[in-house]
Image (tube, rainbow, N blue to C red):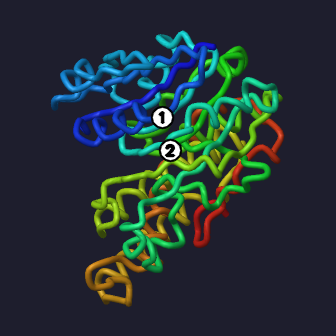
Amino acid sequence: MQLSIIICTRNRAESLRCTLESIGKSSVPEGWTVEVLVVDNGSTDQTEQMVRRTNYSQMSAKYIREPRVGKGYAYNAGISAAIGEVLLFTDDDVRVPTRWIEEMCRPILNGTADAVAGGVVYPAEYAAALSKPVISSRRSWFGSTEELDPRQPVSMVGANMAFHRRVLQKVPQFDVELGPGALGFADESLFSFQLLAAGYKLIGAFDVSAEHHFDLTRLTREGLLDLARKMGRSHAFIFHHWQHQRSRLVVPRLGLCHLVRYWTRCFNHGDNVPGGISERALQLEYDLAFYREYIVQRRRQHKYPLRNPVMQFDYKQPGLAGN
């Protein structure tokens, strides 16, 4: 059995080195041929040199360069270069368990599923930072699978996911308008929605957990605001192009968001939390980004046909966005 492990990266050579070392410690079942494809999405650090020095005893490591910025482009470049029957994905800031390869791929090979959503957890030392109120309710923004139903997941997370090559017959690539380097998020979510709508079976394997060592600067005030904007933009894209939903009175709602933000800034109306950010301020940033992007996307024809709504996330968030 041939397996391709695909990792997309950009300017994270040291973190990627730890990820590759983790993969190198994973056991490879007898008779399996495993290749590790590292897709460099325009790095300017030592990524290429580090990957080319990587030497596994049971696997091969290959370096691929995709200069077009955007994780969607990197994903698609990796898929095009892969020779595996099963495609297994992780990120450049993840540590995988010893039996990761077999346990993620076995349900696909024995016919139980066409795709597998693995678990994503955080290192123990992140617990205090992730327990803050505003952050604890948005742990999925950092790649966690905690909010997904392990019995019937509706989405995969790129830090730990796998699917059979046959999925590409109906869902040939990732949407390059979504994900890091583009609108920010939802690239793996949309791919998951598409494979489910095409009739493929997705199961959860959350007991096969990869540990996500993300950059803690995401938890700063500016980092959270940036994530909120990216999430709002990405959800607006899904809202229009996949769900075919409409947001009523979008321009007045956007104007109201601006007024609320002006009011809170001028009168310090309880939205500035020392050293952090309030729930209200973060939601407002999400709403602003959602409506701005929705106004742009609604001018376009729907990119995808309307599918079974059961196969979709509910993107209606608390606050204004999505109403």
Q: Which residue is pictured at 26% across the width and 39% down the height?
A: 12
Q: Is residue 296 visible?
A: no
Give the image quarter of residue 196. Answer: top right
* The label number, if any, that marks residue 97 in the structure image: 2
In the image, residue 117 above or below residue 143:
above
Relative height, residue 137 to residue 120 (above, below): below
Task: For residue 139, say whether it is visible.
Answer: yes
Q: Is residue 297 left or right of residue 228?
A: right
Residue 207 percent coordinates (x, y)? 64, 51
User: Which residue is pictured at 64% across the width and 37% down the height?
Assistant: 103
- Look at label 2 and name its amino acid: Pro
109 and 133: which is toward the camera: 109
Residue at figure coordinates x 34%, y 65% from the top left = 219
Locate the C terminus and report the quarter of the image it occupies.
Answer: bottom right
Residue 94 position (above or below residue 58) = below
| Residue at image location 30% in from the left, 80% down from the top | 265
Residue 68 lies, in percent from the top left, at: 34, 22
Q: Is 173 or 130 nearer to us in this picture?
A: 130
User: Circle 1 sits on which residue?
Assistant: 26
Q: Earlier in the sequence, mark 1 or mark 2?
A: 1
Packing grade of label 2 (10 A; few <14, some 14-19, many >=20) is some
Q: Amino acid at mark 1?
A: Ser
Is there CB contact under 8 Å for labels 1 and 2? yes
Q: Nearer the viewer, residue 261 or 281?
A: 281
- Of all residues, the one furthest to the front in this rendering is 30
Real-space Cα separation, disc 1 to disc 2, in angstroms: 7 Å
The quadrant in which the N terminus is found is top right
Q: Position of residue 209 (x, y in %)?
A: 56, 50
Residue 99 position within the rendered picture, expressed as x and y whole percent measured from the top left: 56, 38
**Element class at badge 1:** loop
Q: Quadrant of residue 61?
A: top left
